[in-house]
Image: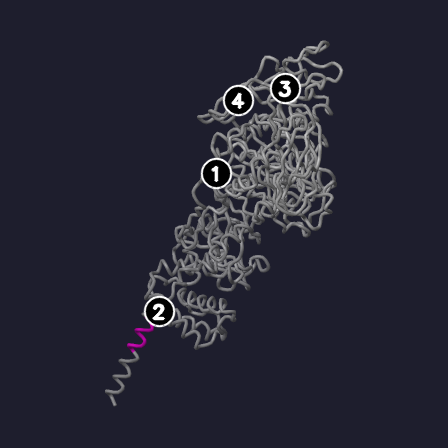
């Protein structure tokens, strides 16, 4: 019998020992799931916070971050023998039993701080499982005592004290000393005074009973008892106790900050569950963020009456592509559209994509002096015939790329895209990070340059930042780091990639900064003309539903969108009137009103060109400018537009060389070749390059005939929803050395006859067709082009 009892005792003892040594899970020290999430700006300033998994405010803490007053006050209030007992204190339990027996009620529990930690762990585990805290029964107390012994065996005293300080309840959903210090006194725990430390140390005994907000007198009485215990334990002197009691306690329930709501919400989406608990450091600058929010709030009052109900602003650091400020709505608390984060919403950009269309053209070898055709012209497009027009309702003839981009001429931009090709332009936009253009290029068609696709303001700002960096694309970043349980994880978004030749990026930026080139459309003193260097572009979508201003200085890129979040049209408010004013004010603040003009990279040269033809300045030109060219691409020929020629006074036409017209007049004029000759005559801008029929060209003259439209090979589609009569293909030819009319042939069948500028329209027919042009006087023919109509 004795042997059986001995074996049973041995087995029981072994089981008890194993149960005490069985490893506890890391939840004692790892509280990330339960901790609040705190968002800081790039300088460490608090932006916002969110409660943890149990809907409580709790932040990580270490003993080094806590005032020594707190630790002493806590030990005096809860467990003076903490450093000498093994987790359960028999003396304290005996003393509590005597006190309760004398008072005939429970006045003391005798639980050690470690036992209280065990109870908190049990309640925590139940809460995560969706259960109520365990009841305070004898069995539960025994389980807590057992857990306390395990804790003491597996953790040192400093770790246990840290764990308790992070879990102790202080009322009003404040858990842990850090949350309590911040919530009641607005300070971090290292700055708590003795009076404040004693006040807080008394709360965990009964967070509701000693509620500092609703039961302030009880909390003060409890503070007095804690100070008396500290004095009795010789932790403080009588003088310190008197001064602490005399110190006024102003406990207030401080709400956590809720700044930069849309940026914080976006960061939360980016991190997901991995961002739960701990500290998230954002790239934002809190001071700049507040100023930008105020600018938007002030200016939206001006645009509201014209339909500009809200606005979005993105400010990026040019060097790193870090987001310095992001406003998603004019008023984040607005119940109608405050939750709509327009900074990451897909909106039509209007003309704001044009710089990249021109950059793609320059990549193909064209220059800032290349001429775009801003004339009435139908363009064959994916969905039929495209007929763009300009914002001012006028056509401007031959326009150098510099003026065409600076003045945001729509017809010229479509001409540039048509000549460049949708594929090449689209590839550059994709490389610049505009991933919301997620259809095939022909889906958007030539309208891409006028905003037929949708982009997000944050992505468009980042694309412009790539121009500011000389053609280097870098993904934008909002979250800089996430720190939880002492482990910091920095966020790296990827290396920079080159998407554009730095010389081309410089030329595009130089055009966007050219106030003189911009002036005919935007005026001499528009809001875009800053007293420091900036490159800027506006955009207005179809129907005035979105307007934009995007631009960069030496240090920052700013994108502004103004519109109605519900998609309603504005009352003829352009990007300058709406977004431009906000852009300038934000740029002033973000750049500090300082920005130097960038230095041209190697491989660029300047050549003085004619302001009309873009060719090298000639002796008859009446004005020129210095233009940038990539080495080897500058013009070599002198201007052919400005000439001193003989004119037939009867019809105003040119007298060809070798013709002896008796009454010819010699004049200095601007001569516009095809396809600009008809525009020149209508606009009274000069004369057409047509010769007088009274002096036909000599028989030996060589006739050169070529098709301008269609291209050598075209693939078109008939749109079943558009009347067939409206789907016509422009047939246009250029001829030199002859003055007669031109006949156009489709599949050897004449379909039209035209004088200069030799343009007719052929109604589209399904099938594969051969098209050529023929000069009626000489019989000369152009090469045959092929068109596939489906």
- Tell me, yes or no, whether the two marked residues, 4 and 3, touch with CB atoms within 8 Å: no
Left of 709 or right of it: where is 9?
A: left
Q: Residues within 10 Å of mark 4 (few under 14, many from 20)?
A: some
Q: Residue furthest left?
A: 3
| Residue under numbered circle 3 | 699
Question: Gap between marks 4 and 3, in whole Å?
Answer: 33 Å
| Residue under numbered circle 2 | 149
In terms of secondary structure, where does tag 3 sit?
loop
Q: Which residue is nearer to you in this view: 243 or 50? A: 50
Residue at position x 55%, y 53% in the image? 251
Question: Gap between marks 3 and 1, in whole Å?
Answer: 53 Å
* Residue 405 appearing in the image: no
* Residue 143 appearing in the image: yes
N-terminal-most mark, 4 or 1: 1
Residue 532 percent across, percent down from the top left = 56, 26
| Residue under numbered circle 1 | 499
Q: Which residues are magenta?
A: 13-20
| Residue under numbered circle 4 | 635
Question: Gap between marks 2 and 1, in whole Å?
Answer: 64 Å
């Amino acid at each position: 019998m004795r042997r059986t009892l001995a074996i049973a005792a041995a087995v029981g003892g072994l089981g008890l020992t194993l149960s005490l040594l069985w490893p506890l899970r890391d939840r004692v020290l790892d509280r990330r799931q339960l901790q609040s999430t705190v968002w800081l700006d790039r300088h460490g300033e608090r932006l916002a916070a969110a409660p943890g998994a149990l809907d409580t405010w709790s932040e990580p803490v270490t003993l080094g971050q806590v005032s020594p007053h707190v630790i002493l006050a806590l030990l005096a209030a809860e467990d003076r023998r903490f450093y000498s007992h093994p987790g359960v204190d028999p003396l304290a339990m005996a003393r509590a039993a005597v006190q309760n027996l004398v008072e005939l009620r429970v006045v003391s529990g005798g639980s050690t701080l470690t036992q209280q930690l065990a109870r908190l762990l049990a309640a925590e585990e139940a809460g995560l499982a969706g259960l109520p805290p365990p009841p305070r029964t004898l069995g539960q107390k025994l389980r807590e005592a057992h857990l306390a012994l395990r804790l003491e065996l597996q953790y040192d005293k400093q770790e246990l004290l840290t764990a308790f300080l992070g879990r102790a309840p202080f009322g009003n959903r404040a858990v842990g000393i850090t949350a309590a210090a911040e919530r009641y006194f607005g300070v971090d725990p290292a700055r708590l005074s003795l009076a404040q430390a004693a006040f807080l140390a008394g709360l965990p005994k009964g967070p509701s009973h000693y509620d500092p907000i609703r039961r302030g007198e009880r909390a003060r009485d409890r503070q007095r008892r804690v100070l008396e215990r500290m004095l009795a334990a010789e932790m403080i002197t009588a003088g310190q106790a008197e001064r602490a009691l005399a110190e006024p306690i102003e406990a207030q329930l401080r709400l956590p900050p809720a700044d930069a709501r849309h940026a914080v919400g976006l960061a939360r989406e980016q991190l997901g569950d991995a961002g739960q608990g701990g500290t998230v450091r954002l790239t934002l600058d809190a001071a700049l963020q507040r100023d930008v929010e105020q600018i938007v709030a002030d200016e939206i009052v001006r645009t509201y009456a014209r339909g500009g109900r809200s606005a979005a602003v993105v400010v990026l650091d040019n060097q790193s592509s870090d987001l310095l400020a992001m406003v998603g709505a004019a008023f984040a608390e607005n119940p109608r559209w405050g939750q709509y984060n327009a900074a990451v919403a897909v909106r039509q950009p209007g003309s704001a994509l044009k710089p990249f269309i021109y950059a793609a053209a320059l990549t193909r070898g064209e220059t800032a002096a290349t001429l775009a055709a801003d004339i009435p012209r139908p363009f064959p497009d994916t969905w039929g015939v495209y007929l763009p027009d300009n914002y001012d309702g006028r056509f401007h003839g031959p326009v150098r790329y510099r003026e065409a981009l600076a003045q945001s001429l729509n017809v010229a931009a479509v001409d540039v895209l048509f000549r460049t090709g949708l594929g090449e332009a689209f590839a550059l936009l994709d490389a610049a990070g505009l991933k919301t253009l997620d259809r095939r290029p022909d889906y958007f068609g030539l309208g891409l340059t006028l905003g037929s696709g949708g982009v997000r303001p944050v992505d468009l700002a980042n694309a412009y930042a790539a121009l500011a960096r000389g053609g280097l694309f870098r993904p934008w970043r909002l979250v800089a780091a996430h720190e939880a349980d002492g482990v910091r994880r920095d966020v790296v978004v990827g290396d920079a990639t080159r998407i554009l030749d730095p010389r081309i990026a410089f030329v595009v930026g130089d055009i966007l900064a050219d106030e003189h080139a911009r002036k005919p459309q935007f005026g001499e003193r528009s809001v875009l003309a800053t007293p420091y260097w900036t490159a800027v572009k506006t955009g207005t979508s179809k129907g005035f539903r979105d307007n934009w201003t995007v631009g960069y200085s030496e240090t920052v890129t700013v994108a502004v969108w103004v519109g109605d979040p519900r998609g309603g049209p504005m009352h003829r408010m352009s990007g300058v009137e709406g977004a431009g004013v906000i852009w300038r004010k934000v740029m002033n603040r973000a750049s500090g009103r300082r920005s130097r003009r960038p230095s041209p990279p190697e491989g660029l040269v300047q050549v003085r060109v004619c302001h009309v033809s873009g060719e090298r300045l000639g002796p008859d030109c009446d004005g020129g400018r210095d233009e940038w060219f990539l080495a080897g691409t500058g013009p070599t020929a002198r201007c052919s537009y400005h000439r001193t020629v003989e004119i037939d006074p009867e019809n105003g036409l040119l007298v060809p060389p070798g013709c002896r017209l008796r009454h010819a007049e010699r004049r200095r004029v601007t001569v516009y070749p095809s396809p600009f000759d008809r525009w020149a005559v209508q606009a009274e801008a000069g004369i057409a390059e047509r010769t007088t029929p009274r002096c036909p060209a000599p028989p030996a003259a060589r006739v050169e005939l070529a098709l301008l439209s269609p291209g050598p090979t075209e693939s078109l589609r008939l749109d079943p929803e558009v009347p067939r009569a409206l789907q016509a293909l422009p047939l246009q030819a250029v001829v030199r050395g002859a003055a007669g009319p031109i006949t156009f042939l489709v599949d050897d069948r004449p379909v039209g006859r035209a004088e200069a500028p030799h343009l007719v329209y052929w109604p589209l027919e399904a099938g594969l067709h051969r098209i050529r042009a023929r000069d009626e006087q000489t019989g000369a023919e152009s090469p045959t082009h092929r068109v596939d109509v489906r």
